[in-house]
Image (cartoon, coloured by chain):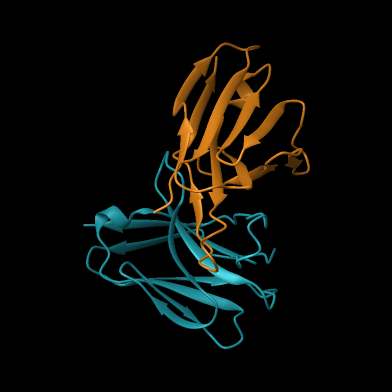
């Protein structure tokens, strides 16, 4: 699986837009990029997934440049409840890859202040 | 959406005892489940891949005789920490993919089980 690199931590304030960038220089052709959120003492929760360009859902946007060697998770107008650890995962998440193991990187610890 | 449930959520045991943690996929079938361990302030570490009807595949450095995994049905995998010691105290998390969720990549995680060995 492609190794990912993220900032260890980030701080922001309520109402701001937060962008977390992940580097994955060795991403393979079949690899997708998926972001998860984890609160203390809970399992990770799926946020968003993309393959290329831009993906948006009700909670976040994911920007992926043409070379796919990095991606940026964008959280609009964060609140205190967005304080969590965010993980960028890269791997073959395709339909026939249910057995592909998922390796977590260090994640980014996001702290939101009032 | 698909739900993965773990039980128990918390367990405290004495050193030397064995503890079983269950992971169930509630509304989908999972031929493969994954077990992770997470220490405080650290990321999730993959321990093993649980395969229904066959032996689990363990990651390097994970003792298969220490952490017994049984995936007896398409909706249940169990992790048994045998002869637990204080250093086994950790947060154990299971996950599974719904093979019917084509190309969404969503990996569903359980709530986690916090093991404390005294």
Extreme residue in the bottom direction: A66
Residue A26 in view of the camera: yes
Work out whether residue B108 or residue B41 is closer to the camera in this orientation and state it. Answer: B108
Residue B43 in view of the camera: no
Q: Is residue B63 left or right of residue A17?
A: right
Work out whether residue A77 or residue B106 is closer to the camera in this orientation and state it. Answer: B106
Write the residue at 67% across / 55% down: A99
Residue B64 in the image, given as x and y percentages of width and height: 76, 31
In this view, B102 is above or below A81: below
Residue A3 in the image, given as x and y percentages of width and height: 67, 64
Write the residue at 59% across / 20% down: B19
Q: Quarter holding the N terminus of chain B?
A: bottom left
Residue A7 in the image, given as x and y percentages of width and height: 51, 64
Question: Where is residue B103, by image quadrant?
Answer: bottom right
Question: Where is residue A15, by image quadrant?
Answer: bottom left
Residue B6 in the image, given as x and y percentages of width and height: 48, 34
Q: Exactly how many numbered labels are in the figure?
A: 0
Question: Where is residue A32, by image quadrant?
Answer: bottom right
In this view, A66 is above or below A89: below
Write the residue at 53% across / 82% down: A52
Q: Quarter holding the C terminus of chain B?
A: top right
Colour cyan, chain: A
Write the residue at 54% across / 66% down: B102
Q: Colour of chain B?
A: orange
């Amino acid at each position: 699986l492609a190794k990912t690199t993220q900032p260890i931590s980030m701080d922001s304030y309520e109402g701001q837009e937060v962008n977390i960038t992940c580097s994955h220089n060795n991403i393979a052709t079949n690899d997708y990029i998926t972001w998860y959120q984890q609160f203390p003492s809970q399992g990770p929760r799926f946020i968003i997934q993309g393959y290329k360009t831009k993906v948006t859902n009700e909670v976040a946007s994911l920007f992926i440049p043409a070379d796919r060697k990095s991606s940026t998770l964008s959280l609009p107008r964060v609140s205190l409840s967005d304080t969590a650890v965010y993980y960028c995962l890269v791997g073959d998440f395709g339909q026939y890859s249910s057995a592909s193991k998922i390796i977590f990187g260090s994640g980014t610890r996001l702290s939101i202040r009032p | 959406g698909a739900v993965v449930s773990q039980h128990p959520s918390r367990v405290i045991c004495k050193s030397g005892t064995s503890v079983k943690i269950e992971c169930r996929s509630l509304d989908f079938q999972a031929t493969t489940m994954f077990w992770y361990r997470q220490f405080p302030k650290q990321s999730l570490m993959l321990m093993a891949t649980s395969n229904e009807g066959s032996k689990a595949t363990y990651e390097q450095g994970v003792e298969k005789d220490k952490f017994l995994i049984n995936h007896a049905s398409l909706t249940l995998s169990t992790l048994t920490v045998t002869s637990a010691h204080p250093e086994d105290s950790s947060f154990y998390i299971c996950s599974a993919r719904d093979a019917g969720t084509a190309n969404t990549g969503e990996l569903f995680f359980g709530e986690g089980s916090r093991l404390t060995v005294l």
